[in-house]
Image (spheres, helix red, strand yellow):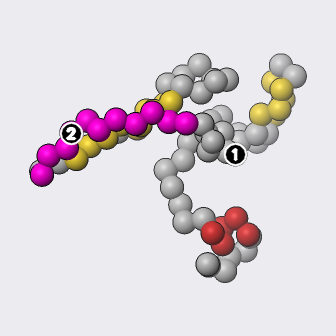
Amino acid sequence: MRSTDNQFEDYYYGGWHEVLPNSPGFNYRGQRWDNTARFRLTPWKHAIIRNTPEKVSSSSGLRPLRIPILIEKR
């Protein structure tokens, strides 16, 4: 455990996050949107693209329920 200014960072060591939209919280069509944890609990699909002794590559992606986009990482 680390000792930081807040409890979340005491146990958080980083990651490759997506925060969309990246803005202060707002209301849109009667629904509250905030800028944190947007895809933290959303299941991602994963695939191995290449797996050889010389190179390993993978792809991860998702289609959010409320935002009409595809997010993909390779």
Return the residue at label 2: 50
Residue at the image position 51 percent from the left and 55 percent from the top: 15
- The kind of residue tagged 1 is Thr
Which region of the structure is painted magenta?
Answer: 43-53
- The kind of residue tagged 2 is Arg
Residue 31 among those drawn in magenta: no
Decide if residue 24 is on the left or right side of residue 50.
right
Mark closer to the observer (2, 1): 2
Q: Residues within 10 Å of mark 1 (few under 14, many from 20)?
A: some
Q: In which quarter of the image is residue 40?
A: top right
Answer above or below: position of 30 versus 71.
Answer: above
| Coordinates of residue 37 in the picture (x, y in percent) | 67, 45
Specify the label residue 36 is tagged with: 1
Q: In the image shown, does 5 or 62 lie closer to the viewer?
A: 62
Q: Quadrant of residue 23?
A: top right
Q: Residues within 10 Å of mark 2 (few under 14, many from 20)?
A: few
Specify the label residue 21 is tagged with: none
Residue at the image position 70 percent from the left and 65 percent from the top: 8
Residue at the image position 59 percent from the left and 19 percent from the top: 68
Decide if residue 27 is on the left or right side of residue 5.
right
Q: Can residue 21 be seen in this view?
A: yes
Disc 2 is placed on an element classified as: strand
Decide if residue 39 is on the left or right side of residue 50.
right
Answer above or below: position of 71 versus 14.
Answer: above
Q: In the image shown, does 37 or 22 lie closer to the viewer?
A: 37
Determine whether label 2 and label 1 are within 8 Å by CB. Answer: no
Dominant secondary structure, magenta? strand
Disc 1 is placed on an element classified as: loop
Q: How far apart are marks 2 and 1 (CA)?
A: 32 Å
| Coordinates of residue 3 in the picture (x, y in percent) | 66, 80
Which is more N-terminal, label 1 or label 2?
1
